[in-house]
Amino acid sequence: MAVSSTQVQFDSLFGLFTYLALTVGIVVFSFLIYLIIRYREKPSSRQPSDTPILGRSPPSRGHSRTVILTLTLSTIIIVPLIIGSFGAVDKILTPPQNVCQGCAIEVTAHQFYWQFTYSNGTKPYRTVGILRVPVEQNIRLNVTSADVFHDFGIIGYDIKTDAIPGRTNTIWFYPDITGNFTIQCFELCGVGHATMKGTLMVMTQSAYSAWYNSTVVH
Amino acid sequence: MLASARRWLYTTNHKDVGILYLITSIFLFAAAGVLALTMRTQLSVPGNTLLTADIYNQFVTVHGMLMIFWVLSPLAFGFANFIIPLQIGCRDLAFPRLNAMSYWFFLFSGVMMILSFFFGAAPDLGWTLYSPQTAALFTPTIGFNLGAGALILMTVSITMSSVNFLVTMLKMRAPGLKLRYMSVFSWAILITIFMMLYAFPSFLAAVVLLYVDRAFGTVYFSSIQGGSLLWDNVFWFFGHPEVYIVLFPALGIIADIIPTFARRPLYGAKYVIGAMVLVAMLSFAVWGHHMFVTGIGIVSTKLYTVTTIAISLPFDVMIISLIETLGMAKLRLKAPALFALGAVANFIVGGITGIFLASVALDYALRGTYFVVAHFHYLMVGASIIGLIGGLYYWFPKITGRMYDEKLAKIHFVISMIGFQILYFPMFLLLDMPRRVVTYTPDTGWGLLNLTATLGGFIFGGAQLLLFYNLYRSSRIGPPSGPNPWEAWTLEWALPSPPPPHDFDVIPTFSGDGTIRFGTSPGLPNGSGQPSGIGYPNGSSVKHDSSLLHSEGLSPWPILMAFAAFILFLGLTIGKPANPQPVSYQPFWPLIADGVILGVISLFGYSREKFTVHEDTHVESWPFKQVPNMKLGIWTFLGAEVIFFGVLIGSYFFVRTNDAAWPPAGTLFDIRNGFAMTLVLLTSSLTAIMALASARAGNRSGLIASLGGTLVLGAAFLYIKAGEWFSLGGSGVFQNYSLPATSYFITTGTHGVHVFAGMCMTVYLLANAIKGKYINGDHTALEHFGLYWHFVDIVWVFLFPLFYLI
């Protein structure tokens, strides 16, 4: 079962790519292996008629129609890949405008931890290392960095974005199931890079509301 | 013994230099491989503590840098040095001493990179060196200082090489050898050089800016306005062409090997070459795919998705042509052929997975994971290294005159290919695991795949010992190979193995009907490589006419010059680690002085040395028939300079447009100063023209006066500039306007250094002019100086309005 809508989308696009890649790969490899086996030198091999000799420029060989055929086939293959990618990236880069209260969260990367800021009441409420979100809601994250170049990624969610000082990148997702997931940094940021982790805690909506309301600072 | 050492240290012969490149890069391949195996051992089980994170990050970085800059390219250019002159029928490169100098710069830069381990800290951020972590604030160790020094030296080496090869290949081909008749390997090198020429200046600019940020407290990469995205753009503008720079030579080798062993001409050779040209051009328009998730905007990412996926089309043409060549063939599966075919197979896998990463949507998941690591290792190791190893076996008989052990080579191939797949294929499946992590926890489930990869790593690494053993042993006791063991048809095989120092007794001629003539004899006896030796262009007699002189030419100056640069850069980089305050930087003055003195001595020796390079007049030199070699070299060099200054100016635009608080024109820099400097410099261009005119007219006093005028005007320019610098520096401009100050000091400073270099040339010319040179028709040096000087002036014409008027 998919953990989020972004993952579903990644899986289907990745599936399309993999399917076409395997098809192309198998055809090309079969062709290559067939020719190697068929035309390797044997006692019965025929001498090719156009073997070039030292002292003469090799004769020109090959047809433009092969090139045209190759390019046509390749284009036919890559067009759906481009279209699929465009559709997917439109979704990824169009975060929902209106999300529930407590579903728009600021993410700030530090060497070497993640800080999450909720706008709750008059003062922001901060947590470190744990990102709590409600299930089955659109979640929007504004990601930035307080020091160096990091990359915010959630393992299994197939969504990430760079955390760059001075810039804010927005990503969003829609969790389908509750549970804990690992947040990890995906850009080498120093000695603590490997352990720069956090937890995405997807809670039931009621549990989330209870927690969120308990954080209110008046 | 001593004579032999002297020969290798002082050689300027392209074949010797080629061998030096090959041996050095094989050693560095082993070194970088050991780093890789140590990292693989660390990752073999979760929670391993063999390496600390600090050391691991240093290993990641130095492994990547060594492999990319000090192994893949130099290995390829070892072949290029040895083979290209033979394939195009000339006796050496256009500038043999410059070629030797390129090698020594390359060697010393590699030494400097490795030295960083011994000075306490190597660079530790991966070869991509993402900002702002490279800033002294985050990384105060001297690792990046030394690393930047090493990369600058390396880039200088590459630039010298590119200029040299470009002039050689465009100007010195054997008579009748039209560009379209060159072998695919020669073409691949030519195209690689073009990419180097336009990509590396961008890298040089990036590293220079990084260095001055660290050393002098400028803020290109530590400011928010420049920072991460400025580095990303400048670095990847270079970085993506670089990927093809390390790939194309191997593709060229493969495209020479496969037809030879298939006994058929390459299928669609002209389409393969056309496809390479297309990729080279497109390679400068795809760098954005390295920045898909930096937030560059939806339109940009879509555009880069299309260009990046589209760049696969020409590659399809290349691969299909290589495979198609096997049709109706008589394929001899010797070691070079096996490695070439293995490289093609790996290339297909690496290329197809590249399409995944070209999709911005998939990149949102795959960015920074082991999927990326697997993809580029399939290309850089699977295609490039395996292909280059094919080249090692292929040309081994030509280089040494002996045959390698075929059976051992085949075993080496089988183990290498199996080890390679076990090493890298599991990484495709680790598409959740971040790159460059020192370790991971057991609950991730990544343990088994990592263990498998490590096992494959040791199989692959161990297999290379067979290669080293085979090459070492066979070069001593291998059976004589004869001139053409593969019955190949490119020109290098017409020479004895190994070729004599001067290569060709008689320069071959290509005639319109496709035959190649040596002197008056029509072609080779039958071209089938009969070991009889009759009719081979090189008998045992070596003619000692003047055109062969430089083939034995030894010069001590290239290595000394490189050594001087090495010492100078050590002095610049091992000084007290930089601090954000510019005044706190303390260069290591004794070393700097030492380097400068040695540099001046070797420059003097270099220019005084009687080292004549014979320029053949009857050569194929389209499209630059009327241009002498030296002039073309300077044009080429200035082409690289255009990119360099273009990147500096582009960086200025980048930070300026990102900075809302930029002071309006006229507030910071006094327009009167800028105007005065412009006039002075433009006048100096006029005196430079007058100098040349006087020399042409044979007017010695006019020449001296004009050169003196140029010198004085250059000095006047620097005088005004220095006054401006000091008054700005004293006014605390850095504290109040960090970015405007940064871009001003660096851009005009770099230009000032160019003016100063031009003045040094003027002093040299003036000294010679006083002695009475240049007025008897020998004024080419003045022409070359003029080109450079006008270029420097034109740069100022751009800088003046950018800093003073707008």
Image: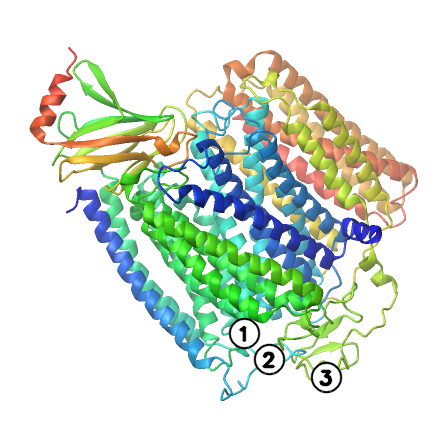
Determine the chain carrying the residue at label 2: A
> Is residue A114 found left or right of B484 in the rendered image?
left
- Viewer-proximal residue among B139 and B186: B139
**Residue under label 1:** B259
Give the residue at mark 3: B525
The Cα atoms of the two marked residues, 2 and 1, are separated by: 9 Å
Residue denoted by label 2: A52
| Circle 2 residues within 10 Å: few <14, some 14–19, many ≥20 | many
Between B786 and A138, the residue placed more toward the observer is A138
Q: Name the image quarter holding residue B789.
A: top right
Q: How crowded is mark 1: few (under 14 residues within 10 Å), some or many (20 or more)?
A: many
Query: Is the residue at mark 1 from the same chain as the one at mark 3?
Result: yes
- Chain label for disc 3: B
Q: Which amino acid does label 3 sit on?
A: Pro
Compare residues A154 and B748 and report the one nearer the observer.
Answer: A154
Mark 1 residue type: Pro
Q: Residue at x 16, y 15 (%)?
A: A121
Who's the residue at 9% across and 31% down the image?
A204
Tell whether label 1 touches label 2 (CB within 8 Å): yes
Q: Quadrant of residue B515?
A: bottom right
* Numbered disc 2: secondary structure: loop
Mark with earlier residue (1, 3): 1
Residue at x-position 72% and y-position 62%: B172
